[in-house]
Amino acid sequence: MTRFEEQLKEAMARREPSGDFTARVLAKANREAAGGAGNSWRDWFRAPMAWRFAGAAACAVLLATSGSVMYEQHERAARGEAAKDKLMTAVRIAGVKLQQVHRHVLQVEAMEANQ
């Protein structure tokens, strides 16, 4: 058996509680019942579960933030694609207009050459 297994076996071994265990448990239960323990927000944050909740909330905020950043990047890319499409349309229109002007210039030159 390895050292780790021996330590684990020792830690998991059954032990009898101390003699005043029952009295301590009952006293704490009475204190909590009388004092309304858990009603104060300070008590709530002292509990180990509250720290787990805080960690989970921090993770949720982190995920929401990263999701927001990813959405913003997606939106920026979509706007870029739309701008690119508009630019390509403008370039095609300009190309068509230039071809029309070029044909017109060639026609004028041909008419002048024939005169």
Image: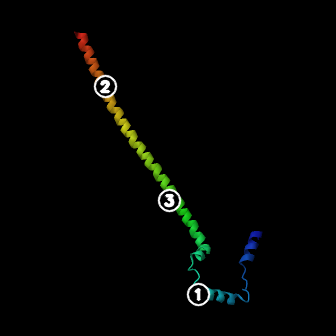
Task: Give SS at disc 3.
Answer: helix
In the rendered image, the quadrant that contains the C terminus is top left
Q: Identity of the amino acid at label 2?
A: Gln
Query: Circle 1 sits on which residue?
Result: 33
Q: Closer to us: mark 1 or mark 3?
A: 1
Q: Residue at x 36, y 39 (%)?
A: 86
Which residue has dot 2 on it? 99
User: Of label 3 and label 2, which has the lower sequence position?
Assistant: 3
Q: Which residue is mark 3?
A: 64
**Real-space Cα distance between discs 3 and 2?**
52 Å
| Residue drawn where x is 34% and y is 32% of the image | 92
* Residue type, numbered disc 1: Ala
Mark 2 vs mark 1, CA separation in Å: 91 Å
Q: Secondary structure at mark 2?
A: helix
**Please, is residue 20 above or below residue 83 in the view?**
below
Q: Looking at the image, which residue sits at the far top?
A: 115
* Spatial CA span between label 1 and label 3: 40 Å
